[in-house]
Image (cartoon, helix red, strand yellow):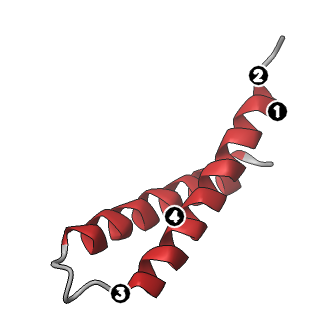
Amino acid sequence: MSTDVITIVAIVSIVIWIAVSRELVKSSKETNRRKIITLMFAGSLSTLILTISLFQNIQF
């Protein structure tokens, strides 16, 4: 992957994880479980993409 794509995925990943943490701080009455699950899935997927691209760029 190009550096620009990795940078964009990293920024999106940061924004997603901030949204997850803000959603988890809300009280239990205001929390939307479906939103949390969707955000965590998207955050995990973006983190996995970043991890794979990192290991592909490591020189052994």
What label does residue 30 carry, if any? none
* Residues packed near mark 3 inside 10 Å, few (<14), some (14 to 19) or many (20 plus): few
Q: Give the image location of residue 41, x and y in percent.
A: 59, 68
| Location of mark 2 (residue) | 58
Q: Nearer the viewer, mark 1 or mark 3?
A: 3
Residue at 76% across, 22% down: 58
What is the three-letter code of the residue carrying label 3? Asn
Q: Nearer the viewer, mark 3 or mark 4?
A: 3
Residue at 66% across, 46% down: 50
Left or right: residue 5 compared with residue 36: right
Tell which circle, 4 or 2, labels the residue nearer the N-terminal end: 4
Tell me the distance, in whole angstroms, between the alpha carbons under discs 1 and 3.
36 Å
Tell which circle, 3 or 4, labels the residue nearer the N-terminal end: 4
Compare residues 52 and 40 and report the one nearer the observer: 40
Q: Give the image location of residue 34, x and y in percent.
A: 47, 86
Residue 56, quarter of the rendered image:
top right
> Circles 1 and 2: CB distance less than 8 Å?
yes
| Location of mark 3 (residue) | 32
Tell which circle, 1 or 3, labels the residue nearer the N-terminal end: 3
Q: Give the image location of residue 53, x and y in percent.
A: 75, 41
Residue at 18% across, 76% down: 26
| Location of mark 1 (residue) | 56
Tell me the distance, in whole angstroms, between the alpha carbons under discs 4 and 2.
23 Å
What is the three-letter code of the residue carrying label 4? Val
